Amino acid sequence: MRLGQPCDTQARGGIDAALAAVPDFTVAAPLRLQRRGAELHLVVGGNVVPVPRPDPPLIRTLADARGHSHPAALNTNYYLLGLVAEKIDGKPLADVFQDRLFGPLGMKNTALPAPASNLIPEPFAHGYLYGSTSYALADARYPEGLVAAAKAGTLKPNDDTWQNPSAYFAAGGVISTADDLATWMRALVGGKVFNAEFQKQWLASPEAPELGEPAMQKYGYGIITISWKPNVIYYHEGEMPGYQSFMGYDPGNDVVLVIWTNLTLALDGQATANSLMLKVLDEIYTVSPLQAAK
């Protein structure tokens, strides 16, 4: 069974057993998120429970080119899947990734670091963030006083290079290079990671924030799309204190784009790599997403 593949009955039993073996976690019923109008609900078996939106929000929002937003995936789910993968394969997730994904795809400069390590293979860029790490972790906006001090030059960003990435685990703890990420996006979108049946489902999974409504940006099974006829870019972004990233692939035009920034949030509160992504696409395409959204 490949990672990410649907499970048959026998494999399903193995996963249930693996989940039961994860400390302090019990599977009582299948879980999934369901959107109903403007609200999100957690479906547990036959029960539907509204998902609260605390401050900071439990579910992050991503702004599209027109200023709308939609719910993104919960990192907790990916963390849990990492634990499941370890139980199924009987080895650390770093080895699972290497054996199943990085090795076969020839990604020689990509790895999931050991939990206790905060080292980054050289060469690397230092990562910066103004103020507390909470501004990156909770999508909190910079206060006016901080912005004013930074613009005046009296406040410098903190060097957050040595933040331990183990908290992200399967949700985003991997260290890589731009070349390897380009390889990954081509393989993922090009059908080298999933089988043909699931690849078809995966490519068709992105949905609009409001179901049935037209939208330039959609979210699916761990993938986001930006669509403006006739172009479609499959992508995802990621961040931790000090860094922000965007990696995407347009299979129709064979365009792969990887952007890394070493300042998580600009002083206007925008994620830096995402902001650059729209500007770069404006240079690459005759009609860009920004132009199409006007």
Image (cartoon, rainbow, N blue to C red):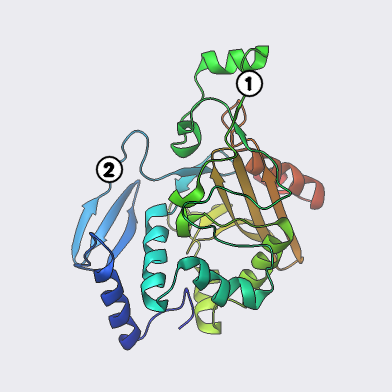
Q: Residues within 10 Å of mark 2 (few under 14, many from 20)?
A: few
Q: Which mark is residue 74?
A: none
Q: Which residue is mark 1?
A: 156
Q: Residue at x 28, y 48 (%)?
A: 51
Question: How far is mark 1 from mark 2, CA to CA?
Answer: 36 Å
Number of numbered callouts drawn: 2
Tell me the crowding category of disc 1: few under 14, some 14 to 19, or many 20 or more residues within 10 angstroms, Cα based.
some
- Name the residue rendered at 36%, 69% in the picture: 84
The local secondary structure at tag 2 comes to: loop
Residue 94 visible in image: yes
Q: Nearer the viewer, mark 1 or mark 2?
A: 1
Q: 116 or 292: nearer the eye? A: 116
Question: Where does the image place residue 148, in percent across and percent down from the top left?
Answer: 59, 13
Identify the residue at image location x=73%, y=68%: 252
Q: Tag 1's secondary structure?
A: loop
Quadrant of the image occupied by residue 88 = bottom left
Q: x and y percent of residue 155 in the render?
A: 61, 16
User: Is residue 65 among what the camera can see?
Assistant: no
Q: Decide: is 42 above or below 52.
A: below
Instruction: State left or right for residue 96 relative to residue 188.
Output: left
Task: Determine which residue is flagged by label 2.
Answer: 52
Of mark 1 and mark 2, the one earlier in the sequence is 2
Task: Work out which quarter of the rendered image holds the C terminus and state it.
Answer: top right
Is 47 rendered above or below residue 10? above
Q: Nearer the viewer, residue 273 or 216?
A: 273
Is residue 210 shown above or below 290?
below
Horizontal side of residue 215 vs 289, given as left or right: left
Q: Quadrant of residue 17?
A: bottom left
Q: Amino acid at mark 1?
A: Lys
Check disc 2 and give the amino acid type.
Answer: Pro
Looking at the picture, tell me which residue is in the foreground, 54 or 250: 54
